[in-house]
Image: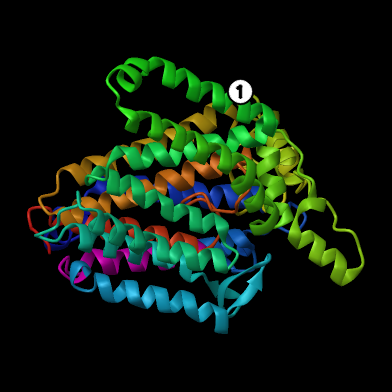
Amino acid sequence: MSRAIPKSVSKGVDWLTVWLYAVLVCIGILCIFMAEYNPATYTSSSFFQGQTNYSKQLLFAGLSVMVATFIILSDSKLYPAFANLLYVFGILLMLSVFVLGKDVNGSKSWIPLGGGFNLQPAELCKIFTALALSKYLSQLNMDFSKLQSQVIAGAIAMLPAAISVLQNETGLALVYLSFFIVMYREGLPGIILVIGFSFGALVVATLLVEKNLLAILLTLIAALIVFIFRRQIFTRKRWNILILIVSIWFVCVGIQRFIVPYIFNNVFECYQSQRIYSAVGKDYDCSQNIHSIRQEEATGKASIKPDDYNVRQSKIAIGSGGFLGKGFLKGTQTRGRYVPEQSTDFIFTSLGEAFGFVGSFLFLAVYFILLLRIIFLAERQRSGFSRIYAYSVASILFFHIVVNVCMTIGLFPVIGIPLPLISYGGSSLLTFTIMIFIMIRLDADRQMVLR
């Protein structure tokens, strides 16, 4: 394939990454075909007529090839030069959704383009955010150990996330947290990540353990830490250690008794709280949710408690695949359309049922190789801009893969983010195509220092 392309174009292009991308796109079309195949209506011509999701995805793939080719032919210097401008454009595009957008599955984050096609600006803005963050962190005089620099970088990443939350796209908003992995690589203090993970662990503990018992456990842990540091505190009179321990205990108890219940009852919708509770095997009482109470007052009807039907059917489908799978187009759960959204958020179920544990393992191995390759590309860059951008791509892909797969097997709440290059959707496929091929273009000029 590369021999047919002029050397001036293909020089420096990492073809292993290109082939891994192509393999994943082909697997995606295959999975969508398995999820939607109906022998009663299928004809060979219908595959190319654009009337089904798999044929539309084939069209999106063709468009993605053209976009990828255009990026390969572009000048690497354009991306740092227009990074900030593209970021501003992305933010304005996301804000325009509030005026031009339409509701899709309860989320107002789509702009209709006509012909049944829609654009989701929050997807595209991931690319613009990665470019803007790379531009900011690669400045010649950047000192990322300063709090001001860390706050600005965090604001660049979190502004699109905040707009996504307002658009009721919590899943995409969480994806922007992956940029903190990039910041950690560039010198963000590890204590910030420790605090973030500790907060997550405390939230999970709050859901699993009765609140009074958890408060007692937190008190015992604090007392144990005071006992361990008793000599420094009481003998050496280092009261600041005691104040720090008591302060952390006070914050933790306050979070588990007041902050977490407030978020679940007043910020999240009932179905969002239920999904998170179900992920840890618990049941959420929607009568405590302010949104459900208001809905009941407005309609006079009690809100219907959401269930985890999607996840249960997904787990049944994947589990029925066994070790080797049922075979191509032989999945009963997939063919019977028991799994909702099985072409988009739950596309992994079609692969798991058809090819079983072995097929799923090999599929995830392709992802793993792609992530390792991207990290390898990142580390060989002379330019800080290119390195940071490559790590942004790896972090976004990693977050999408882990969350989506864990979501389909019930280890993570259903938040509705696609499986990269696999799930049906033009916005998603084009976004990941642009994201990956910008990285490939930058890597082709890896000896150049971009500012």
Q: Hey, which residue is sitting farthest right in the picture?
A: 300
Residue lying at 56% horizontally and 68% vertically, measured from the top left: 166
Name which quarter of the figure residue 322 lies in.
top right
In magenta segment, residue 217: no
Colour scheme of the rendered structure:
rainbow
Q: Mark 1 points at which residue?
A: 323
Residue lying at 53% horizontally and 31% vertically, measured from the top left: 359
- 74 displayed left or right of 435: left
In magenta segment, residue 63: yes
- 442 displayed left or right of 287: left
Amino acid type indicated by mark 1? Phe
Name the foreground residue: 62 vs 441.
441
Where residue 230 appears, as percent x and y from the top left, is 37, 17
Residue lying at 46% horizontally and 31% vertically, measured from the top left: 362
Magenta span: chief secondary structure: helix
Q: Give the range drawn in magenta.
A: 58-78
Crowding near pointer 1: few (<14 within 10 Å), some, many (20+)?
some
Name which quarter of the figure residue 81 lies in.
bottom left
Where residue 270 appears, as percent x and y from the top left, is 73, 54
Where residue 134 appears, as percent x and y from the top left, is 24, 59
Name the foreground residue: 22 vs 264.
264
Query: Helix or strand or loop: what does disc 1 sit on?
Result: loop
- 188 displayed left or right of 326: left
Name the foreground residue: 192 vs 324.
192
Where residue 248 appears, as percent x and y from the top left, is 45, 36
- 324 displayed left or right of 386: right
Say if residue 316 shows up in the picture: yes
Work out which quarter of the rendered image holds the C terminus and state it: bottom left
